[in-house]
Image (cartoon, rainbow, N blue to C red):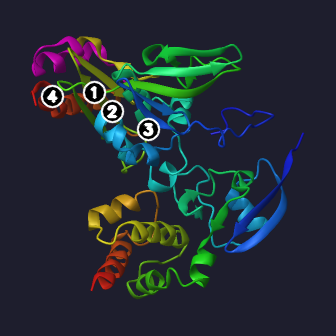
Amino acid sequence: MEHALDCTLTVNGTRVQRRIPARQHLVDFLRDELGLTGSHIGCEQGVCGACTVRVNGEIVRGCLMLAVQADGCTVETVEGLSDSREIAKLQKAFHQRNALQCGFCTPGMLLAAQDLLSKSRKASREEIRAHLSGNYCRCTGYQAIIDAIEEVLSSDEG
Amino acid sequence: MRLSAPEILVDIGALPLRDITLEQGVVRIGALATHAQIGNSPEVKKHVPLLAQAVPHVAHPAIRNRGTLGGSLALADPAAEYPACAVALDASIVVAGKDGERLVPAEKFFKGLFETDLGPAEMIVAVEFAAIGKDERSVFLELARRHGDYAIIGLAAHRSEQNRLVFFGAGATPVFAANASRAESLDAAVAALEDDLDPPADLYNTSATKRHLAKVLLTRAWNTLSTAH
């Protein structure tokens, strides 16, 4: 028996109405149904952080939440944050600091980094590391990512 | 991990089980209180400091925004933080079923690997913790490969009249180290862990390594536990 539910949610500012299979994960819904492929699917068990999205203003794992649980919620993906220019400074710093290579982890990194920026304007490198500890990067060795976030933090203070 | 394949899923997320209240020396935390909510709660910080200390070790920010106290206890992962805290603090788990509510002492709640006292038509609705007394102390320590990952080994320790030392990542359930908890000196407590702990090896660590690390954590915790404020 396959269940499906009628859901209404707001994704990147657009109201979306769909009949969603109960077992579909949020990240699969965003990618397959809405074509928002910026959120990546890595481990599918909450470890790697590549699928990180924002639901009602808080970052969550897109692979650990069912899409039907987002009924009535506001969902934001890296596409939305990029279009609104909310993460423009971070994107520029990531580019300039070489904070990405293959780019697979980058959307999740940007979401987690922006979450930190929105909560704490004076994070230490240790605090940046702790906040990103749930996001794996297999290319950069993390230093450049921490550098980029630190740069955005210090530029805002100045 | 696909350990079970239920035909029907019921989302309990919208039930009003998120409150954290303090009443007559008991902190009652709703089963749906998230890790983030528990970590930010002034009541928890002040009255159940062991739990507040544990939160930063529970996974990562994006997971702490969704994961809940009730979910962690009901899953009963042997390397998770809250089950050990609940046992160390002698918490009462409030279980609701068709016939009403019953209170289960944490030590009796964890039956085996991912096995709890919950019946098929029951769910956790809250957990009750006694507020910490003025002469009591709590220490939470954990070793993991990456910050936020499940523990290699961890210690949830509480001292009231006597120590209650509970290790996680050390067996199929939280392991109450009965002999070490009775010991009067650090040397005796560390020696007692030989009898108290027989941790199963994981992918990266042998049983002997885990027991050694358990002794390291106990040594780190000892001064805080045994020194008066």
Q: Residue at x 17, y 34 (%)?
A: B220
Relative to A93, say whether B213 is above or below.
Answer: above
Residue at the disc numbered 3: B203
Amino acid at circle 4: Trp
Residue at the disc numbered 1: B132
Amino acid at circle 2: Val
Mark 1–mark 2 Cα distance, whole angstroms, equals 6 Å
Residue A34 seen in the current view: no
Residue at the disc numbered 4: B222
On the image, which quarter does residue A35 sit in? bottom right
Decide which of tag 3 and tag 1 comes sooner along the chain. Answer: 1
Considering every residue shown, the one lying at the far right of the view is: A1
Residue at the disc numbered 2: B48
* Viewport quadrant of the N terminus of chain B: top right
Residue B213 seen in the current view: yes
Decide which of tag 2 and tag 4 comes sooner along the chain. Answer: 2
- Pair 3/4: label in front: 4
Give residue A23's position: percent from left, percent from top: 77, 47
Decide which of tag 2 and tag 3 comes sooner along the chain. Answer: 2
